[in-house]
Amino acid sequence: MVFSLGILSAFPAHAKQEDAPTDQMAKVAVRGSADSERRNEATTRIVVDRDDLDKYGDRSILDVLKRQPGVTVANNDIRMRGLGGGYTQVLVNGDRPPAGFSLDTLAPESIARIEIMRAATAELSTQGIAGTINIILKRSASRATREIIAGVGGAASARYPALTVNASDRLEKYAYTVGATLNHSDNGQGMHERVQERRFDESPDHLRATDSRNANRFTSLNANSRLQWESGEGDKFAWQTFVNAARSAGTSEQATVVESGPRYPYPLLLLDYDGKNENIRSDLSWARNLGEEGKLDTRLGLYRSGSDRGMSRLGLDGASSAALDRRYETGVDDKGGSWTGKVSAAWATRHAIAVGWDAGYSDYRENEVQREAVASTGSAPINFNNTYRARITRLALYVQDEWDIAPGWSIYLGMRWEGLETRTGGDAEGFKRRSSVLSPLIQTLWKIPGSKNDQIRLAVTRTYKAPELRQLIPRHFYTSYNFAVSPDQSGNPQLEPELATGIDAAFEHYWTNNAMASVSVGERKVDGLIRNAIRYDGERWLAYPVNSGKATVRSLELETKFPITALLSAAPAIQLRANLARNWSQVDAVPGPDNRLDRQPEWSANLGADYKRGNMTVGASLSMVAGGWTRL
């Protein structure tokens, strides 16, 4: 059970409305709702706007995303179609977050909206086989506000206090927004694990059980500022900076009992870890009108992030003497920049064409140190001090056209080319790898003739998944107890991107304001699948990624939301919402059953209800995710 409580205090910049001059005409801002955007756009995009973000007093963006259709969160890993591990692309302001950035440190109060896209578009990177989630940070407000938000959440063994301050104002040609959020969490949890190792010969099974007790502390601070101004010639400039810092620490105590098989070397394994990371990104953007129908938007951004993490492992044998005493530390420095731009114009009647570019460079450095006072399982101590470096250069060019073919029928056409060059190196020999992907994209929306409420969507896409940086760097991570199902880990600089061809279809029905129901299906055919190969080198088991075969992913999603008054006019003002997702996948190189991709959950569901009376809103939400066996 989880509870949360928030207190909001807002201080307007002007106490009395009548203080404003009365001889000026009032300005009225017209803003389309998120539901109307979703209903009328040719692309499959779900928008979570500020109204949805404000409802529940969520302590992190992960809590917000858990309620969205087709989205699940597992161990801070955001997933669409049940797929994480890089298959779901997560962006902040259209850019990939730097290394070490953790989304659970991003406060909902700093976010303007979240865009969830089941099918790829050319403007954003096509590195999202499962889909893309784009988090848009707050921009300059249209009015003066001052806010202080205090909240506390918790569960049986967890506490989550938080404090947020925000301020914004708009002058004649200038506007600004500044804000900061401080989050802290203190939680503990237990886990029971049974590991059974079956051998193909007739030797007895190996079976052991481990009980763990973990305690974790986490503190984060994120701040966001944006300054916007307009020139006399109509040019618009904006400078936005985002800063994030976090500290974490924790302990774990693992007690293992062997039920059958050889003796386990660490009946008691004590672990403690500590970490810190800092991220800063600053963007300067410029928008200029090009005649009556054209516009130029460009943005130059720089970022830098750093993190330091350490882990100590002390293994005790049955006599309470040390059988393992290891300290592992790693430090990461990541810096780089990006330059994006888009030129849009009305190409012809009922066409909106845009061409753009996206270029970037990053320089990643990592140093890892391991020291053993007592070596594991009686082997020689494993001590090292390694340095790795990766330099990534990327360039993307794209064109897209949104075409209203006829009343009730619109189509989106896009083409994106992305090129990537990765250079990895360090103490050992360096590697250089180039790859490129051409992605044709098509999406269409057809409103069924004779019906004002029903419409059909269809999308065909070409997407890819680039190898993660940790998969490319040839580092060697040593496990505490090395065996077939707990091997050491290493990278592979020769990896190629995974390529996927996808098709999505949906039927949507809208019958009143804020009332809709939809059913959508999708399939992805993945080539060049990256999966772990495992080998024994005579001394230790080692897992390393390779391109191996194909995989198929299928999904079914059902969603509805509506006020009870749409069914019963005399009912209370309660808004109901529900969604259900069923996922399937199959890896060809792994025999079935349960040969699913990336530990994909079989299904997920969300149920919720909201009641509003006057200025008070009360709501409840239930999220469920079904696990299951996965054969690796």
Image (cartoon, rainbow, N blue to C red):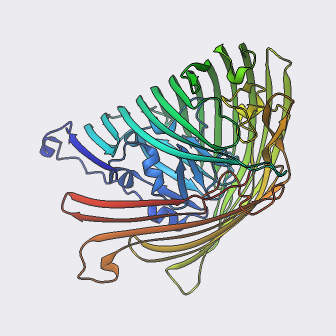
The extreme bottom residue here reads: 450
Please tell me which residue is depicted at 12% across the width and 45% down the height of the picture.
Answer: 18
Please tell me which residue is depicted at 59% across the width and 33% down the height of the picture.
Answer: 299
**Where on the picture, by quarter, is residue 147?**
top left
Position of 632 relative to 459 (above/below): above
Q: Is 14 on the left-hand or right-hand side of 156?
A: left
Please tell me which residue is depicted at 30% across the width and 36% down the height of the picture.
Answer: 161
Position of 354 relative to 594 (above/below): above
Q: Is 116 on the left-hand or right-hand side of 341?
A: left
**Where on the picture, by quarter, is residue 446?**
bottom right
Tell which of 240 and 106 is nearer to you. Answer: 106
Position of 95 relative to 207 (above/below): above
Tell which of 480 and 460 is nearer to you. Answer: 480
Q: Is 150 on the left-hand or right-hand side of 599?
A: left
Mark yes or no: residue 466 visible. Answer: yes
**Where on the picture, by quarter, is residue 422?**
top right
Please tell me which residue is depicted at 29% across the width and 70% down the height of the picture.
Answer: 574
Position of 392 relative to 193 (above/below): above
